[in-house]
Image (cartoon, rainbow, N blue to C red):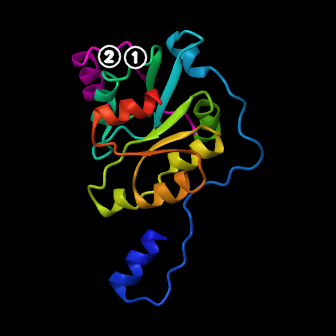
């Protein structure tokens, strides 16, 4: 609806129809698995915080890595599921912050098997910042994949994310500009 409103105002349109760009999830959520625990040799009690999608600029991923230095809950691990130009830089950053033992990188998974991996996380995170209209009004695929996998969400307090996450009571809305704020949400 935020994008429809923007288009209406910008182009003087009487009405804009919204068509969600998300795959419909039929049936129950996939069974809760431990695929990341197995892949990275994590203790059974480990909590997995997941970011899935492209590791590209403009997604606030560096701040997400920095947040791990402030997480006080033992055995919390951040998993990046996906590929992209920032993978090496994020890995170096994790080493510099001395959290590389709790930040893991898993290659992309084909769409038909993705939700099994998503369901293996304890929480999904969407740390985008409103640096452009695309980010401000985003409803990224990962949002709907987290929902389909019944994974609670920590998301930036952006209009459409707020409407879907807070509006359906399926996660926390936070200020993701600060590593400490992200860490506090993860600890909570």
- Residue under the image location 25 percent in, 28 percent down: 89
Residue 67, percent across and down?
Answer: 32, 28
70 or 31: nearer the eye? Answer: 70
Query: Could you tell me if the residues under marks 1 and 2 are in contact, i.e. CB atoms within 8 Å?
Result: yes
- Report whether residue 80 is seen: no
Q: Residues within 10 Å of mark 2 (few under 14, many from 20)?
A: many
In this rendering, the answer to whether 50 lies above or below 138 is: above
Q: Is residue 127 magenta?
A: no
- Residue under the image location 45 percent in, 14 percent down: 74
Q: Is residue 105 magenta?
A: yes
- Residue under the image location 29 percent in, 33 percent down: 179
180 or 136: nearer the eye? Answer: 180
Measured Cα–Cα span from mark 1 to mark 2: 5 Å
What's the magenta region? 87-110
Q: What residue would you read off at disc 1?
A: 102
176 or 83: nearer the eye? Answer: 176
Q: What residue would you read off at disc 2?
A: 99
- 130 on left or right of 138: left
Q: Quadrant of residue 186?
A: top left
Residue 91, percent across and down?
Answer: 30, 22
Residue 34, percent across and down?
Answer: 62, 20
């Amino acid at each position: 609806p935020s994008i429809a409103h923007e288009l209406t105002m910008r182009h003087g349109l009487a009405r804009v129809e919204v068509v969600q760009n998300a795959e419909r999830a039929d049936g129950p959520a996939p069974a809760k698995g431990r695929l990341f625990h197995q892949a990275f040799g994590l203790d059974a009690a480990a909590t997995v915080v997941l970011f899935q999608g492209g590791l590209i600029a403009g997604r606030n991923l560096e701040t997400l890595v920095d947040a791990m230095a402030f997480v006080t809950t033992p055995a919390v691990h951040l998993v990046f599921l996906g590929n992209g130009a920032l993978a090496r830089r994020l890995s170096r950053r994790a080493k510099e912050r001395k959290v590389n033992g709790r930040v893991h990188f898993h290659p992309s998974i084909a769409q038909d098997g993705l939700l099994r991996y998503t369901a293996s996380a304890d929480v999904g995170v969407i740390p985008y910042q409103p640096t452009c209209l695309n980010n401000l009004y985003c409803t990224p695929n990962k949002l709907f994949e987290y929902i389909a996998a019944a994974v609670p969400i920590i998301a930036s307090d952006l209009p459409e994310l707020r409407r879907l996450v807070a509006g359906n009571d399926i996660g926390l809305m936070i200020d993701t500009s600060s590593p400490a704020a992200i860490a506090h949400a993860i600890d909570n």
